[in-house]
Amino acid sequence: MPCGQSIQQLIYDPGMNWRLSFAALIGLAALAVLACGPSGDPATRGGVIAPAVERPEDLAGLLDLPSLVGEVVFPWSEVTIRRPSAVITVGVLVANTSDRRSRGMMYWSGLPPNSGMIFIWEETRARSGGFWNQNVPIDLSVAWLDQDGTILEFSTLLADDETSKRPRQPYFFVLEMPHGRFETMGIDIGDRVIIPETLLPNQ
């Protein structure tokens, strides 16, 4: 059934009694929702969390989601990175639920300039688990962050590589960017990623 076609037109039959017509209407409406699904580019959904005010338009087309893979919606926000000589604003997709963290950067072919994905857990504590790049078509740079956001180490994840990488020390948060972005922006170990309270769990 083409999306947007009138369901009433499809089921109207003067010979049907009203109960049968109503049942048909409900059933076809459910089918329409399943068939048509949400409209627009999946990369543009997810809303915004302050301090960001809008999602960048150039997210559109960067998510190549296979037809049989369910959509995971990521909110958009911002963090700031304090360096000795500058403060840099970085836009981020927010991976703050188990579904979002499990999906991560899978199927993203890139991100706009000065942007990445921030991984935040419901409980803020030291962690040691590794990250991999399964179903991620680009190389990524991973910044492992201390509790106050200080960058402890960097790791590189190669495209579609299922090798798990982890830092030599416990971490609390993770910031991923397309490979080479940290270097291009002059971000280094010891710089501090300031995560706004609006992104942190209530504890």
Image: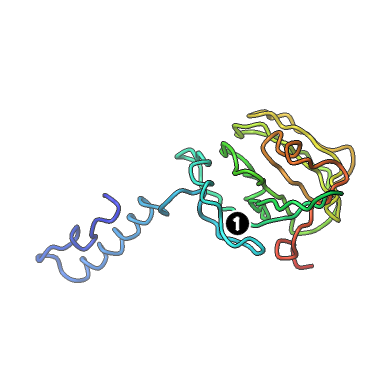
Q: Which residue is drawn at 79% across and 34% down?
A: 155
Q: Could you say where residue 36 lies in the image, as x and y percent from the top left?
A: 36, 52
**Classed neighbour count for the residue bearing mark 1: other residues with Cα under 10 Å, few (<14), some (14–19), many (≥20):** some
Occupied quadrant, residue 22: bottom left
Three-letter code, disc 1: Pro
Q: Residue at x 54, y 47 (%)?
A: 59
Q: Could you say where residue 171 lies in the image, as x and y percent from the top left?
A: 84, 47
Nearer to us in this view, 81 or 62: 81
Identify the secondary structure beneath mark 1: loop
Q: Residue at x 83, y 51 (%)?
A: 192
Occupied quadrant, residue 108: top right
Kindly identify which residue carries mark 1.
75
Nearer to us in this view, 127 or 152: 152
Nearer to us in this view, 167 or 198: 198
Nearer to us in this view, 123 or 39: 39
In the rendered image of this protein, does residue 159 appear above or below residue 131?
above
Quadrant where the C terminus sits is: bottom right
Q: Residue at x 71, y 65 (%)?
A: 198
Residue ranking furthest to the front: 85
In the rendered image of this protein, does residue 94 appear above or below residue 111?
below
Q: Could you say where residue 43 lies in the image, as x and y percent from the top left?
A: 52, 48
Left or right side of 82 for 106: left
Q: Could you say where residue 158 lies in the image, as x and y percent from the top left?
A: 69, 28
Left or right side of 22 for 46: right
